[in-house]
Image (cartoon, helix red, strand yellow):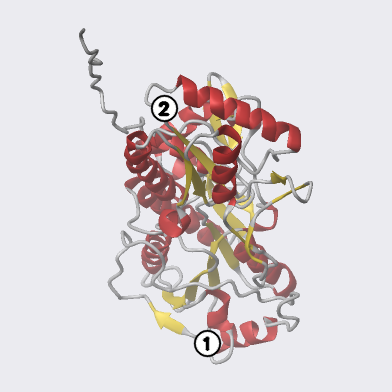
Amino acid sequence: MKSEHKLFKGKTLAILSGGGDTPAINSSIESIRNRASLLGFKVYGIRKGWKGLLGEGDIVDLTHQPYDGWYGGTALRSSRTNPFPSKKNPESRVPQILQNLKRYKIDVLVTIGGDDTNGAAKRLYETEGIPVIGFPKTIDNDLRTRTMHNYNGNNIEAVLCPGFPSAAKAIAEFTGNLKTTAESHSRIMVLEVMGRDAGWLTGSALFGGANLALIPEFEITKERKEFFFETVKEAYLRSPKKMLIIPVSEGVRWYDDKSDKVDVVYASSELDEYGHPRFGGISGIIATEISQKLGIDARSQITGYYARSGRCSEYDRRLTTTLADKVVDLLLREEYGQMPVMDKIVSHHELEEFNTSKVDMGSIGNKPLSTDYYDVNKFEFTDAYIDFLTSILGKPQFTDFEYDFPVVIPKG
């Protein structure tokens, strides 16, 4: 018998985004909204992450509204609000969240976020029975999505999260532009890239012409620091144009001569509600020490929020729609507490639902860069990483000034 109604008619699904923004969140929201609407859900947007479920609530109706998924960031806005007690906020907000879910008659919650946002959602599912589905989001690309990358017949555990492809494209372009000023002054540029615990995004600077790199996975001890400076000097002298671009992750652990300790550099000692301090400034310290110890002109450049900003890339756009297709499967099966992921690293045209899978939201955790992708003895990303990123960005397209000029020698 033909059904008169859509399967989930009379039900309400709500979407929230928490944590740092990315260029792909609006695309994620639009893709999830479109598919949930087709299933019959009324779709709400919760503004400012978990904060939008506190007090009287801050809820908007997305059901029959235009939505620009190409526009970067999140139109629902975001916050780093933690529903559960923390050092910064000892009060539990769970009762307020439960009250507003009931008040607005929300049946299913989709949380777009990283380990913090989705970890909190999973905890609410386990302790309060709230039907939740997580959706991955991070420019750092450090969630454990269990996405496999086949390289030369070997499977490497990689990561693929919405937001990373757009951010990687931005860092590659940023580096390519910076390259011209480094060449003009025969200078070493130390490029600071977001990445608290992992160097996935830092590696994308290679596609803009970067050379050596430092990542959080391998701390720079006193001995390794000396070796790094020797490597930098040799690479600079070998460089035809006497220039280098060295990308470094903001979370690099660096040896400090005065304190005799290895630690990160903090931009602020203040912690957010998930206990994270704000990093920043490592590039300036490294550039200064290169100038002082090697006598080579070196400057720092912080990319900061540039990687988070701007338009959603085509790869990210298709990635979000593919993972939203998997959300439909999870909704139909009522498999809550799960997050859609890609099974394997594929090119743009292979981003299809049959290449997706799911992981438990409570076990996503953080995934550092695989040792297959970085040569710790050379301070360089490997060919395996280049192959990984080529699947996402295509081949590197930075340009070079190809000409060389004959040196004039005075006669007589």
How far is mark 1 from mark 2, CA to CA?
58 Å
Q: Residue furthest front?
A: 412
Q: Residue at x 41, y 65 (%)?
A: 29
Residue pointed to by mark 1: 57
Task: Tell which of 352 and 347 is nearer to you.
Answer: 347
> Type of residue at label 2?
Lys
Badge 2 crowding class, 10 Å Cα cut-off, few under 14, some 14 to 19, many 20 or more, is some
Badge 1 density bin: few <14, some 14–19, many ≥20, Cα 10 Å: some
Q: Nearer the viewer, mark 1 or mark 2?
A: 2
Give me the residue at 47% from left, 63% from top. Answer: 21
Identify the image quadrant of residue 295: top right
Q: Is residue 227 left or right of residue 354?
A: right
Say if 109 sits above or below 173 in the image.
Answer: below
For badge 1, the amino acid type reads: Gly
The image position of residue 340, as x and y in percent, is 54, 52
Q: Which mark is residue 242?
A: 2
Q: Residue furthest right?
A: 260
Residue 87 against residue 254 in the figure, above or below: below
Q: Quadrant of residue 25?
A: bottom left
